[in-house]
Image (cartoon, rainbow, N blue to C red):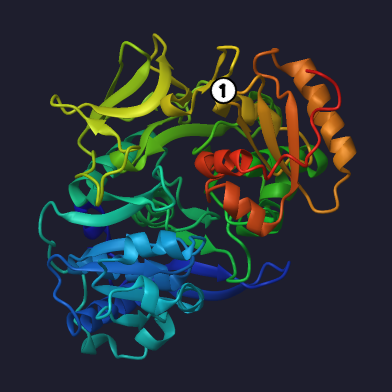
Amino acid sequence: MRLVEDALRHRIANDDVFVEVFASGRGNDVARSYSYRQILHAAAGLASGLDRVSDAAGTKVAVVMGNSPDFVTADLALLGSGRTEVPVPLAFSADQAASLLCDADVCLVDGPGERRLAEWGRESILPARCPVLRVDVEDLLVDPYDAVPPLFTSATPGDRIGKIIHTSGTTSKPKGVRIRTTGLDALLTSLRAVMPPGSYGRYLSLVPFSLLIEQVTALYMVILDGGRVMLLPEDAPLVGTSASATQRALPYVAEARASALVVTPALAEMLADEIERTGVTAVFGTVQVPLVCCGGAPVDPGVLARLDAGGVPVYEGYGLSENSSVVSWNSPGARKVGTVGRALPHVRTKLAADGELLITSDSLFAGYSRQDPSSCELDPDHWLHTGDLAEIDVDGYISIIGRKKNIIITAAGRNIAPEWVEARYRSLPGIRACAVFGDGLESLHGLFLVPPGADVKQTRHGIEEFGLRELSAVERVAVIHTLEGTEETYREFFTVTGRPRRREIADAAANGRFRHLLPALTPA
């Protein structure tokens, strides 16, 4: 990652703020703040410590951490020392974590990561001889600056596997996507070309660092802009990991006065509600509207229209780990609502005969850590078959229709792309998450997570009336299942980015877990 390394070489002695952590509560206090000089010194100290327990070449280092300065330090230490980083989401189950940790050479943890590792059972998910090192920036800053050889004084080896990023498979065990450092360079070069300079001067991180897109935007784009990343307090849930996280994140959106942030569809809807209620300045803490980007799942067009009316454009994008994250992105000056933008400059796209989106680029991955039926195919001509059905208009803007393998075929022979239907239903007040299913069934079913204590009868009426008013007979949910959106239920049926865990939902339905729930109040 020459771009990031070059930028950091110029900031080794820079005292500008790089990482800030908010204090708990509703004040605008910053609990901790670290400069570029401090984080880079801590990263160099950590790299020296790793040298004492493992070789650099070929070493896989698991990073079991929350969104903390310690994660930032670990990420840069691994980048600068030439090791391979394996980030593990704290929201994973023990089985999921074990599938990524089974061949780790070293495991790095912060406070939350240490607690989560104990909950999983260290002995059952880590190799027997894998040391666990606690990373603490404060401890690493105790050593004098002249006592630790600095990182990034010379280039690390050329193309190598810099990261192994999790992505879902057909079982409960995720597969690892092997990310090349030169691939990340190609991606960052393209993003820098389409995003306005300085956009990442103040970035508010709301989703887990274990996601590659958040590492790209919250760390590397911030570094390239010489900006700062602002982190939520340790006790604040990250968006996508908790049903209540979007509501709890709102006060920090105002406190951060960010120049950029990435939001989920649920947070986009909540921003629209708050802007209509209190105004842009109250929501963002400043009259300057930040660069608001969204990906992972489609945002309801009605929500986008409401945000546009409030003067807040949302720039939707599309990506997958197999391309080192971003494939296409709307950007200021090149935005078409309802699409995921044009392909980045280094990416070429085309459609297969059945409408599947194919891509090729310099940022393609180097294969999987293990194969799975859900793995994307790379054909002999180096075109990646994404598994997504899409349309590309005459101006090059891409619209994602849905996952090829997710297409629902009802007993009546109707084909339904669930992603679009789910985006429409998610716009309803009081719906924390939803998923539709119905393969081989007479009609479409919907699973809706509602807030604890919600009036279920009223919510169900709202779902039914919305379907009758806004959706066709084919797309409309005919059988409504409502569940209380507890933390456990959310994590069981939805990923950290808000995508339905379709296999788990299908299994639950097949096992009769939803049978006690009432059908729609009237025929759809």
Instruction: Name the side, left or right, on which 304 lies relative to 96.
Output: right
Label 1: element kind: loop
Which three-letter amino acid code belongs to the residue tagged 1? Gly
Residue 52: percent from the left, percent from the top? Answer: 18, 85
Instruction: From this view, report whether residue 510 is shown above or below residue 416.
Output: below
Residue 180: percent from the left, percent from the top? Answer: 20, 49
Dividing the picture into quarters, in which one does residue 487 lie?
bottom right
Residue named by callout 1: 440
Query: What residue is shown at x 63% (from left), y 65% (from top)?
Result: 236
Instruction: From this view, report whether residue 230 is shown above or below residue 276.
Output: below
> How many numbered marks appear?
1
Label 1 neighbour load within 10 Å: few <14, some 14-19, many 20+: some
Q: Which residue occupies the foreground of this view, 293 or 371?
A: 371
| Observer able to see residue 15 | no
Instruction: Name the side, left or right, on which 9 lies relative to 311.
Output: left
Residue positioned most to the front: 511
Quarter of the C terminus within the rendering: top right
Instruction: Name the side, left or right, on which 510 lies relative to 486.
Output: left
Query: What residue is shown at x 49% (from left), y 62% (from top)?
Result: 93
Query: What residue is shown at x 55% (from left), y 31% (from top)?
Result: 298
Residue 83: percent from the left, percent from the top? Answer: 20, 66
| Observer able to see residue 482 | yes
Dividing the picture into quarters, in which one does residue 270 lie?
top right
Instruction: From this view, report whether residue 453 is shown above or below residue 357.
Output: below
Residue 121: percent from the left, percent from the top? Answer: 44, 76
Q: Which residue occupies the foreground of this view, 17 or 101?
A: 101
Query: What residue is shown at x 48% (from left), y 25% (from top)?
Result: 402
